[in-house]
Image (spheres, rainbow, N blue to C red):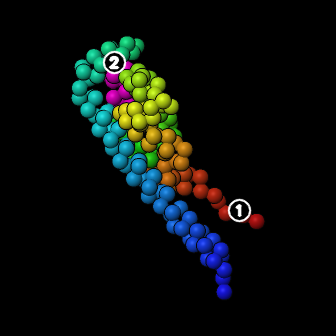
């Protein structure tokens, strides 16, 4: 008869394997939801460029017109790429940089309150995009992604011939 410790160990292993199977679907859900949201944000900015340029001008950003177009296009296209899981690493790096710049320029008070008032930090608009970008950057896009399928196609190990 197995001891309680052995049964708990087996149960723990079973739970770990079950949760590991949820990694790719979870990463897919994060990519689809936040990629869509980022794309929608970019689309909205593209359709309100004069307001975005005015806002960027008020933040004293360099070349506010060109910066507004670049950020809007990046968020629109980057959101689509993130949702698809295509060229994920560069896209996530761009999202992280974009959100840090958003914090530093548009929400300095929230950014500065990272340690003193974390609620203010994580309630700021850039937080969820920053978190999603970091999550996918660190854990990858998962097996349900264009990157994974392209990797399988192009870098599939060939059986060695003897």
Measured as percent of width and height from the top left, residue 41 is found at 30, 35
Q: Residue at x 50, y 31 (%)?
A: 115
Over which residues does the magenta segment extend? 65-75
Secondary element at image label 1:
loop
| Residue pointed to by mark 2 | 56
* Above or below, comparing residue 46 to residue 65 in the picture: below
Q: Earlier in the sequence, mark 2 or mark 1?
A: 2
Instruction: State the image coordinates of residue 53 (x, y, percent, origin top left).
Output: 29, 18
Q: Is residue 85 visible?
A: yes
Is 11 left, or right, of 113 in this rendering? right
Q: Determine the residue positioned at 51% across, 63% down.
A: 19
Indicate the quadrant containing the N terminus: top left, top right, bottom left or bottom right: bottom right
- Residue underneath mark 1: 160
Location of residue 6 by image quarter: bottom right
* Residue at the outermost right position: 162
Of 26 and 127, which appears nearest the observer? 127
Residue ID at (33%, 38%): 39
Residue 17 falls left or right of residue 68: right
- Residue 40 locus on image (x, y percent): 29, 38
CA–CA distance in space, label 2 to label 1: 57 Å
Mark 1 Cα shell of 10 Å, populated few (<14), some (14-19), many (≥20): few
Name which residue lies at 41% across and 23% down: 109
Relative to residue 46, is residue 12 depicted above or below?
below
Q: Secondary structure at mark 2?
A: helix
């Amino acid at each position: 008869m197995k001891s309680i410790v052995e049964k708990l160990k087996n149960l723990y292993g079973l739970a770990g394997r079950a949760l590991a199977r949820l990694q790719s679907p979870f990463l897919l859900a994060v990519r689809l939801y936040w990629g869509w949201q980022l794309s929608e944000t970019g689309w909205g900015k593209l359709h309100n460029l004069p307001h975005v340029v005015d806002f960027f001008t008020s933040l004293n950003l360099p070349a506010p017109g060109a910066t507004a177009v670049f950020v809007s296009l990046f968020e629109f296209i980057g959101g689509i790429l993130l949702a698809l899981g295509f060229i994920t690493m560069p896209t996530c790096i761009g999202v992280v940089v974009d959100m840090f710049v958003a914090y530093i320029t548009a929400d300095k008070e929230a950014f500065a309150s990272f340690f003193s008032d974390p609620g203010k930090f994580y309630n700021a608009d850039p937080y969820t995009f920053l978190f999603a970008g970091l999550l996918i950057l660190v854990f990858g896009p998962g097996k349900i992604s264009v990157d994974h399928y392209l990797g399988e196609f192009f870098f599939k190990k060939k059986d060695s011939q003897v």
